[in-house]
Image (tube, coloured by chain):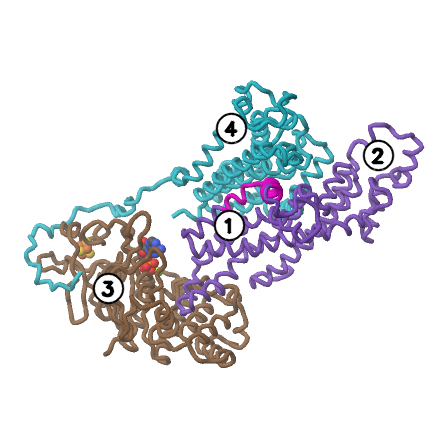
């Protein structure tokens, strides 16, 4: 809650600290029109009143109207575009977990064998190449040259493939590396030796005793990873012309559409706070030493 | 070693049983050469081929960025209107862009910007981050609590989002990028240094310094920070590529440096609409940024392996 | 007495990038049915590697390079992994030095004990649970029904070691290897654990290999003692022999370093000067030579052979050679 409030406050005053109002144009508007607009959006009220009004509306879940698009509210924009971004994000998360985790585990179990070298070479490249480079290269090779998949828009299920791979690329590589080092570290632990001394088959030693422990550090990174997927969507949605929330957010920055910037930022902050809460709960599930509320 | 009865080896001459002269008891100690932490780390780093490759690549890129544009006859903003979108050739090694500008020079200028961003980010890390973390860790208690709560709050929102908001307020441009990075990129370092100092400050040598009446500042700068140097270097080496990436990311979104300046992100973004006709426009900046990031990552991984105290034996 | 375990000329090395580390060098001993023997030596002398070699649990780059381990008539060194798994935890149980790290932190204690029972015995979950409760109360953990559902971090060090013992003994193994079971514990708890092992040895009638660096612990429990130094056996014999008639200077040093617990539980011990040698490139001669007060010319050149001193008593020292000067054990 404190985080959300802080984000609201900082963003609100930042937006109002910008020299020139949102309606400053190259060609000055006639004073009468200007006055009209300012009244409609309560821009003439003192700053503190605007702030308290905004907070009051926010508590009711109302993020206000868009300055740029007449008659459209920020809530409508989010309601329309967020589901698309969420699909993209979930697809990326899915790729990250179902490619990154197994790759890391296999690497660790086949340490210094070819599987390990292959996976880790790919992962090293994966964490070094920026997502927009991956996205543009994918689009050029698979989309333009080979023509296998659509290069833009959000029309069919095929549209989701390239963007989600590009978005997941870095984090898949990151998770693979993290998983590998985590599994290797856990396999050195005394309790693994205990499990072997009990005569358990290697399969049980690895998948029961090692894996759950190895997941603990990965869960810790889940919050930052999801935050990264969120910001990554800005650039991916731009490249593939996907009408998601990230694309709207970037457009609103270009348009200086302050209520949208403010509203989407607040929405993102709330989303991330919720995500972090879920991660914390997950963390308690997986590590009995952590108790909720601590 | 079989169980030979003593009587079986009678033929040993008497003088063999004279006592050895008294020796220093610790001969065993010197049997393995003792190496200092830094010498040891440097030796391990040098053995790491990928890390060394990364380091040489970075040096090469730095040299190119400094010298390259001087050597080339073209400037980054010269437009050759008759030569738009040429592929790589003898005169324009990387070809020209859709406005007829020499791509080689533009990519080298991009390197300058990226390296400058990396430099600024690391300086900030080293000053603001280290000081903030150091003070929080040393002060402890309430002060530490408040200082770290602030860091935590910033931390739960992705840094890129803050940078974007800053860019909205101060407007695009290289200076804004530096300021925006400056406002957020010291957070991680502050955390790392604080955690280190919290463990270090309980140790004997700090207690001893305190007992001798050393001031807080002296303890921090002479005793604590030098002992955190390993983690500090690792964090810096991880943060440089992150900062370079963030700049490219922002520039790609059109929130970074302004035209006609060219950062790698701008170049890649410019190439996007023309990707069907001039794919080379994408290839070279993408290559440049990927190679740089790879080089920094290799060096960073190498440094981590070389400096991580847990690996020391 | 028939032997449950016979170890002959066992040698184990670690092939590290720096070279071959000879952690165990040509050691032989046996353990009788229902007998407890002790292996003592400073840390790094190869005790743990010996026990892991017996259990076939060495991880890369460690390898048994020579010798045989015969358990209840079966050769273990070349046993297939699948068959070996049926021996581990079932016929040979093992407890480790650090109870704080030897239990898996993310599973309940009950889960970890029952796991062994379910694997080796034909029990259903309910029976395994009952058996686990029985084992917990056997090792002296109060309220076993509740304790079963708790995680390791909810137990104290001593209690965790009791859990480890319960886990190692739940399948009624013929042999228990206890690798420094008391080293990580407080002095008072140490005594309780040794008392417990002594008690259980008779109740369950299992043989025990007790590994420790504390000769005092051995005296309480074991009938015979093996003294190891730098991977080799330097002296072995009945507990009586080794305590009252020790013949190796290293054993003398160990006996001097027994912690004496006085009224207010303060330890007093005199450690042996110097450090064990580097096992990577061992110099010729007696490995104890650089630290030995009685070293002679020959000690630096040739390894001393094991000399037979009594029916069971052996030691490897040149002082035992008839040509050597008489040296009295310093006190
Ligand atoms: N994984 C390993 N790699 C290399 N050397 C090892 C390894 N494990 C043990 N050693 C060597 O074996 C020696 C004996 O170790 P250990 O049996 O654990 O001693 P103890 O249990 O008597 O304290 C050590 O001094 C070390 O040099
Ligand atoms: S052989 Fe020599 S050096 Fe070794 S213990 Fe005996 S007297 Fe000491
Ligand atoms: Mg040991």
Question: Which mark is on residue B101?
Answer: none
Marks 3 and 2, Cα distance to the nearest angstrom? 89 Å
Marks 1 and 2, Cα distance to the nearest angstrom? 49 Å
Residue sitting at the far top: B73
Mark 4 or 3: in front is 4
Q: Which chain is brown?
A: C
Chain name for mark 3: C
Closer to the chain start, of discs 1 and 2, is 2
- In the figure, the shade used to draw chain B is cyan
For the stretch drawn in magenta, the main secondary structure is helix
Does residue A129 show up magenta in the picture? yes
Query: Does label 2 lie on the same chain as label 4?
Result: no
Q: Residues within 10 Å of mark 3 (few under 14, many from 20)?
A: some
A128 sits to left or right of B143: left
Query: Does label 3 lie on the same chain as label 1?
Result: no
B83 sits to left or right of C152: right
Which residues lie in the magenta part? A122-144
Residue closer to the observer: C283 or B185: B185
Determine contact: label 4, label 2, CB under 8 Å.
no
Question: Which mark is on residue B62?
Answer: 4
Q: Which residue is mark 3?
A: C67
């Amino acid at each position: 809650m404190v985080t959300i409030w802080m984000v609201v406050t900082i963003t609100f005053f930042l937006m109002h600290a910008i020299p020139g109002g949102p309606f400053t144009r190259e060609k000055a508007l006639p004073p009468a029109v200007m006055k009209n607009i300012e009244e409609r959006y309560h821009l003439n009220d003192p700053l503190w009143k605007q702030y308290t009004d905004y907070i009051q509306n926010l508590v009711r879940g109302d993020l206000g109207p868009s300055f740029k698009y007449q008659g459209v509210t920020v809530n409508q924009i989010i309601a329309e575009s967020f589901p698309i971004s969420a699909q993209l994000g979930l697809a990326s998360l899915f790729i990250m977990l179902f490619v990154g985790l197994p790759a890391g585990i296999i690497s660790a179990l086949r340490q210094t064998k070819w599987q390990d070298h292959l996976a880790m070479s790919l992962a090293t490249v994966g964490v070094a190449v920026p997502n927009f480079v991956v996205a543009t290269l994918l689009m050029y090779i698979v989309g333009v040259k080979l023509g296998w998949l659509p290069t833009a828009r959000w029309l069919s299920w095929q549209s989701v493939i390239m963007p989600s791979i590009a978005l997941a690329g870095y984090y898949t590589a990151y998770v693979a590396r993290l998983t590998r080092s985590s599994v290797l570290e856990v396999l050195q632990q005394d309790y693994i030796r205990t499990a072997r001394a009990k005569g358990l088959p290697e399969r049980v030693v690895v998948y029961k005793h090692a894996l759950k422990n190895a997941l603990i550090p990965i869960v810790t990174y889940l919050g930052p990873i999801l935050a990264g997927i969120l910001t990554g969507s800005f650039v991916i949605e731009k490249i593939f012309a996907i009408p998601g929330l990230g694309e709207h957010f970037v457009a609103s920055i270009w348009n200086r559409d302050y209520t949208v910037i403010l509203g989407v930022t607040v929405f993102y902050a709330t989303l991330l706070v919720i995500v972090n809460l879920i991660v914390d709960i997950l963390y308690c599930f997986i590590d009995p030493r952590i108790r909720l509320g601590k | 070693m079989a169980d030979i009865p003593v009587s079986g080896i009678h033929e040993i001459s008497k003088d063999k049983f004279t006592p050895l002269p008294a020796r220093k008891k610790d001969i065993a100690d010197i049997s393995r050469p003792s190496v200092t932490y830094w010498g040891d780390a440097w030796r391990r780093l040098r053995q790491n081929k990928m890390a060394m490759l990364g380091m040489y690549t970075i040096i090469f890129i730095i040299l190119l960025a400094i010298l390259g544009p001087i050597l080339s006859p073209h400037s980054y903003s010269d437009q050759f209107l008759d030569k738009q979108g040429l592929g790589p050739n003898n005169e324009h090694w990387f070809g020209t862009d859709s406005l007829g500008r020499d791509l080689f020079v533009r990519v080298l200028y991009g390197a300058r910007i990226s390296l400058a961003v990396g430099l600024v980010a690391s300086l900030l890390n080293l000053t603001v981050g280290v000081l903030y973390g150091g003070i929080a860790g040393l002060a402890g208690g309430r002060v530490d609590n408040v200082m770290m709560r602030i860091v935590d709050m910033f931390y739960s929102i992705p840094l890129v989002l803050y940078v974007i908001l800053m860019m909205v307020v101060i407007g695009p441009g290289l200076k804004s990028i530096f300021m925006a990075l400056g406002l957020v990129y010291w957070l991680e370092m502050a955390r790392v240094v604080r955690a280190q100092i919290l463990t270090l400050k309980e140790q004997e040598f700090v207690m001893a310094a305190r007992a001798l009446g050393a001031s807080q500042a002296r303890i921090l700068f002479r005793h604590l920070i030098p002992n955190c140097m390993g983690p500090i270097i690792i964090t810096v080496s991880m943060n440089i590529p992150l900062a370079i990436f963030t700049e490219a990311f922002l520039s790609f979104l059109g929130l970074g440096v302004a035209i006609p300046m060219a950062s790698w992100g701008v170049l890649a973004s410019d190439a996007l609409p023309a990707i069907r006709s001039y794919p080379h426009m994408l290839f070279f900046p993408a290559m440049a940024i990927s190679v740089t990031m790879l080089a920094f990552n290799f060096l960073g991984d190498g440094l981590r392996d070389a400096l991580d105290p847990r690996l020391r034996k | 007495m028939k032997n449950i375990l016979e170890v002959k000329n066992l040698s184990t090395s670690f092939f590290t990038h720096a070279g071959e580390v000879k952690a165990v060098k040509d050691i032989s001993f046996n353990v009788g049915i229902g007998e407890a023997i002790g292996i003592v030596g400073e840390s790094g002398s190869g005790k743990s590697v010996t026990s892991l070699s017996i259990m076939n649990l060495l991880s890369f780059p460690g390898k048994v390079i020579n010798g045989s381990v015969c358990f209840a008539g079966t050769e273990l060194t070349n046993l297939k992994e699948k068959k070996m798994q049926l021996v581990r935890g079932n016929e040979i149980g093992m407890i480790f030095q650090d109870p704080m790290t030897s239990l898996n932190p993310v599973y309940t204690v009950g889960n970890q004990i029952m796991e062994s029972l379910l694997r080796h015995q034909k029990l259903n979950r309910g029976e395994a649970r009952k058996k686990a409760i029985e084992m917990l109360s056997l090792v002296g953990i109060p309220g076993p029904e509740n304790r079963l559902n708790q995680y390791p971090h909810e137990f104290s060090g001593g209690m965790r070691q009791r859990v480890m013992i319960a886990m190692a003994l739940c399948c009624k193994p013929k042999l228990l290897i206890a690798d420094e079971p008391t080293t990580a514990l407080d002095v008072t708890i140490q005594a309780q654990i040794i008392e417990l092992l002594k008690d259980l040895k008779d109740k369950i009638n299992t043989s025990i290999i007790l590994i420790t660096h504390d000769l005092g612990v051995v005296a309480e429990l074991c009938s015979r003692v093996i003294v190891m130094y730098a991977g080799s056996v330097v002296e072995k014999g009945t507990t009586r022999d080794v305590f009252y008639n020790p013949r190796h200077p290293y054993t003398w040093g160990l006996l001097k370093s027994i912690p004496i617990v006085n009224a207010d539980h303060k330890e007093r011990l005199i450690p042996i000067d110097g450090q064990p040698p580097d096992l990577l490139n061992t110099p010729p001669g007696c490995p104890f030579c650089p630290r030995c007060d009685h070293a002679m010319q020959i000690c630096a050149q040739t390894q001393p052979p094991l000399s037979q001193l009594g029916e069971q008593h052996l030691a490897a020292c040149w002082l035992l050679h008839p040509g050597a000067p008489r040296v009295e054990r310093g006190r």
